[in-house]
Image (spheres, rainbow, N blue to C red):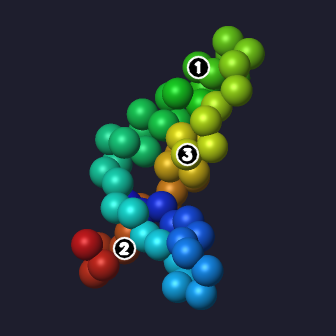
């Protein structure tokens, strides 16, 4: 799994590897925050939006 985010100017994108479990936890946190009327932290939202890496890239 990976999450991409902008890095320092001119250095391109940064890829942070996260597990499937971490993505599932972030999605659960977003669901709970939405139901409880709380604001979700932007980092958690970014992790929840992550897509699994293809098998060849692992």
Q: Position of residue 43 (x, y in %)?
A: 55, 45
Label 3 or label 2, whichever comes before in sequence order = 3
Say which residue label 3 marks. Answer: 43
| Number of marks drawn | 3
Up/down of 49 relative to 22, above or below: below
Q: CA distance from mark 2 to mark 1?
A: 29 Å
Instruction: Report the front residue among 7 and 56.
Output: 7
On the image, the x and y values in percent for residue 58 come to 25, 72
Position of 41 with respect to 4 (left or right) is: right
Q: Secondary structure at mark 2?
A: loop
Measured Cα–Cα span from mark 3 to mark 2: 22 Å
Q: Which mark is residue 1?
A: none
Q: Check disc 2: other Cα within 10 Å, few if <14, some if 14-19, many if 20+.
A: few
Q: Which residue is mark 1?
A: 32
Q: Pinpoint residue 54: horizontal percent, then vertical percent.
A: 37, 73
Residue 54 - label: 2
Q: Residue at x 43, y 70 (%)?
A: 15
């Amino acid at each position: 799994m990976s999450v991409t985010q902008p890095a320092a100017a001119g250095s391109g994108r940064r890829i942070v590897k996260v597990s499937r479990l971490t993505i599932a936890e972030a999605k659960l946190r977003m669901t709970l925050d939405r139901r409880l009327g709380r604001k979700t932290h932007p980092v958690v939202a970014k992790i929840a939006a992550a897509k699994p890496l293809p098998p060849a890239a692992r």
